[in-house]
Image: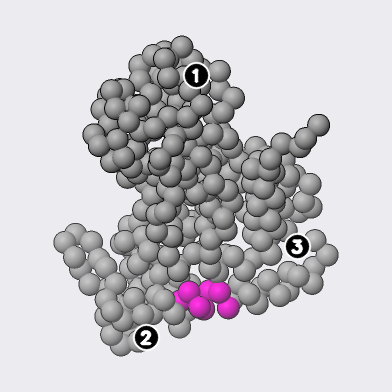
Amino acid sequence: MDPRALQTLRAVGTQGGVTAAAHVLHLTPSAVSQQVHQLERSVGVPLTERVGRGVRLTAAGQALSEAAVDVAVALERASAAVDRLRERPGGTVRVSAFASGAQLLLPGLLERTRALPDVRVECSDDDVPQAQFVGLTDEIDVVVAHRPDGSPGWGRDVVVRHLLREPLDVALAPDHPLARRDELEPQDLADEDWVAVRAGFPVAHVLTAVGARAGSEPRVRHRINDFHVAAALVGAGHGVTLLPRYTFGADPRVRLVPLAGVRAGRLVEALVRRDKAERVVVQRVLSELEALASRITAPPARG
């Protein structure tokens, strides 16, 4: 079997169809279909089946796709064995992060990896619904993702490196009557207008928990995913919102107040496809990312 065709089949499964797989593999849809058909002739059973206008993997296709992971891991492990014998193993590592995570982590990561010989880091920001982060690992080496406290993990298809837990605080205008409180209960916010992210994004789950604790659904007036826009609206007196503490704690437009009675936080984690996690250069970048996250969350030194 052609290992490249196996990875193409795997992408059809993880991306949910031929067209999406073609996009992440930088192939034409016809090239993807051709490789899948070659595999079908090789194994003698159908690997995909049509569903509506798209296709999905059959049981045999799913089994072969899962086996393709082991093949890819073995190949990358063999390559890594050689890399470890090089004086300075390097290469290019693509890193993606959701918008506020990019703001928090990417500048420092680029500064740290600048000192690594022969390592080039290319960054992008991808703010997607929580369910789509794993799919990004087909195209990107390291995906910085976030999920609410207590939510299910990312599954067995990716290696997960915990980076940090970032508390989500209530952001209010500095002159808001509640802005000088040391902490707020969800019930304190029952009469407030909210600036909230769209449904399906991690912070939305926390706001749902706030409403459940308060016994009333939050009154959402504005749906804004860009935290900078949300901070501007809150600072101008157009509602309250939830903002991540490390990223926006020094923003002069708002005052952040911790929430009591609700697990209000997000877990920030690096997701790497299992085969890509074997690459020495990816491991070097992950180590720098973990060290940076530890520095961000370290308590301030006592003077």
Q: Distance between the residues labelled 1 and 3?
A: 52 Å
At x 32%, y 57%, the residue is 19
**The label number, if any, that marks residue 42 in the structure image:** 2
- Which of the two discs, 3 and 2, sits closer to the camera? 3
Q: Which label's residue is closer to the chain start, 2 or 1?
A: 2
Say what amino acid the circle numbered 3 marks. Answer: Pro
Secondary-structure class at tag 3: loop
Q: Residues within 10 Å of mark 3 (few under 14, many from 20)?
A: some
Q: What is the x, y in percent for residue 42?
A: 37, 85
234 vs 286, nearest the viewer: 234
**The label number, if any, that marks residue 89 in the structure image:** 3
At x 38%, y 24%, the residue is 240
The residue carrying mark 1 is 180
Q: How far apart are marks 2 and 1 (CA)?
A: 69 Å
Callout 3–callout 2 Cβ contact below 8 Å: no
* Residue 5 inside the magenta-drawn segment: no
Magenta segment range?
68-74
Q: Which residue lies furthest to the bottom in this view?
A: 44
110 vs 49, nearest the viewer: 110
Identify whether 65 is placed above or below 255.
below
Q: In which quarter of the image is the N terminus?
A: bottom left
